[in-house]
Image (cartoon, rainbow, N blue to C red):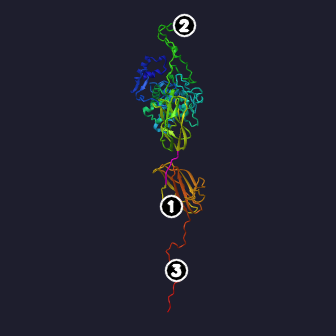
Amino acid sequence: MAAHFGSRLRKGAATTAVAAAAVAALSASQAPGVTVDDHGRQTAADATPSPETDAADDSATGNSPYYTDLPPLNTPRPSPSTVIGTPVSQGPAEAGIPATVLDAYKKAAASLRASKPGCNLPWQLLAAIGKVESGQARGGRVDAEGTTLGRILGPQLDGNGFALIKDTDNGAYDGNSSYDQAVGPMQFIPSTWAWAGRDGNGDGVKDPNNIYDAALAAGHYLCRNGWDLSTQADLDRAILSYNNSRDYLNTVLRWMEYYRKGTHEIPDGTGTLPVGRSDGGTGRTTRPEPSPQDTRTPTAPEETRKPTAPGTSTPGPGKPAEPAPGSPGTTPPPTDSPAPVPTPTDTVHHLEDAGTERLTATAGDVFAERIRTRAETAAGEAVGKVRVRYRIIGDTDAAFAGGERVATVVTGSSGVAVAPALRAGEKTGSFTVRATVVGRTVPGLDYEAAVTERVADALTRTGDTALVCAPGGTFADQVQVKATYKGAAADGVAVTATLIESAQNPAAADRGPYFKDADGKAVRTLTGLRTDARGLLTLPRLYADDAAGTFTLRLTTAGGATLDVTLTVRAQETSSPGSSASPDASSSPDASSNPGPSASPTA
């Protein structure tokens, strides 16, 4: 592993066994738990990658080259006397992060703590990736809004030693209408930015050249798939999904641990720019683009600094040395390279549905059906180990696990990829999930999905008090109902309340009880009402006009539940004075027939 790691670093001729031994001796004096590999590079024992580090997603950067410089061995903590903006020793200088860049990392991590607390994203991980990808935006060369001064571009991904990714943005981000290039301080390729981009500075624009936007996008990218970055296995998977190289994984882990030990803010534009850079496996020396402020004289290429091999003649002025036949350093004659072996992705001709049933779910529920897609050759044979990307398209808040609108799945031996479970949001209606092959241009496959209203099959009043009001008055009691579905409380169910003529005549009433709108005007139909988490709904207060009689309030829900509530408007009963007294002779039937007292008979 260490030998493979070393083969990707461009250290020049100075990387010798003597130098390795010197660095190894220096590292031996460090704190316990820190070791050195056979190239003299520091390795933290407690940050050993998990053996399960295969990325299950395509790379955010298209596996573009990255800076390979490792943190220094001395402590990152600056001296107490260090003044920002003044020269410092190598350790503090490497630990210093430009102010705007550091602010962007911390704000992105804070945003992820709120939106995806289970991810446990440390800002130091964003700083480590920013260091490796762009040298902290070329040492913090950004404007006040966080946008880089000039574009930071990786090499074009034309398949010549790098991935082959033809243009996907018509050159909008990278200025290249033939092939994609990694863009910005976090080095997103345009095809990834199209779905992963975020607006981190609130200006309404998703710009990969802005450190606030790019840092927030990187945070969401690392937190997808439900990963918990406090666990080593998920941390490894997330980093490898950014750039699928174990060398890259180790380099990012080293910088993350270094920043965790201590860092400090430095002015924008004063950060150190890394020197070594990976070559994407081409064998060519690849050096970073210098900052416009970089006035250093470039060192001679490695090939011009090689010592003369034994047996060669000393060249004259302007004449290169000619090695003796068979001597070390002799370049063998070029040979024809064998034709590249097609990858599984290269053989995919089309995508087929693999038996996906109708995609329907009630708002807030998980879709019972999962999307299944089969990758096939032109002859209809299954193709395994192919990445299929699923993207949600349309005006919907439905999402895959972790709240993401994009998920990538690798096909199995049967050629079938099964998308993560979909969860419906609160928006109802139809949307599309599009399946495409990562790394190959073949027609996408669309799946239609629909989100329906939450339903209830029963509505009941929670009280049984008669609802009575005098003409022109206010009903004392408010109507409260409970919605249920199959006996369980139905939350979030939409309810419509309408005053109708009668239970037999459902036409909307134009007299009798009414509700009031925000302006105090009478309304007799209310929509947009929803039950709470317990399935309860309390209607607004009801009022009565001058019409007396019996009226009906009808409540209906999606799912067919209906409830009629009787409302009575009548005048209050009044009585004459003394009517509450006990009846006397004057009010009895006998009294009415004999109005006066009878006289006593005379003699």
Q: Main secondary structure of the magenta part?
A: loop
Residue 593 position within the rendered picture, expressed as x and y whole percent measured from the top left: 53, 81
**Badge 2 or badge 1: first in the primary sequence:** 2
Please tell me how crowded label 2 is: few (under 14), some (14-19), or many (20+) other residues with Cα within 10 Å: few
Q: Is residue 156 left or right of residue 18?
A: right
Q: How far apart in space, not on screen, are marks 2 and 3 (Cα)?
A: 154 Å
Amino acid bearing label 1: Ala
Q: Is residue 457 magenta?
A: yes
Residue 587 visible in image: yes
Camera-near label (2 vs 3) is 3
Q: Mark 3: which amino acid? A: Ala
Q: Which residues are magenta?
A: 452-459
Vertical placement of 396 versus 178: above or below? below
Residue 190 within the magenta-colored segment of the rendering:
no
Q: Measuring from the top left, give residue 19's x and y in whole percent.
A: 44, 18
Q: Residue furthest front?
A: 379
Query: Outermost residue, left direction?
Result: 32
Disc 3: which residue = 591
**Residue 520, horizontal then vertical, whole percent:** 60, 55
* Residue 466 circle label: 1
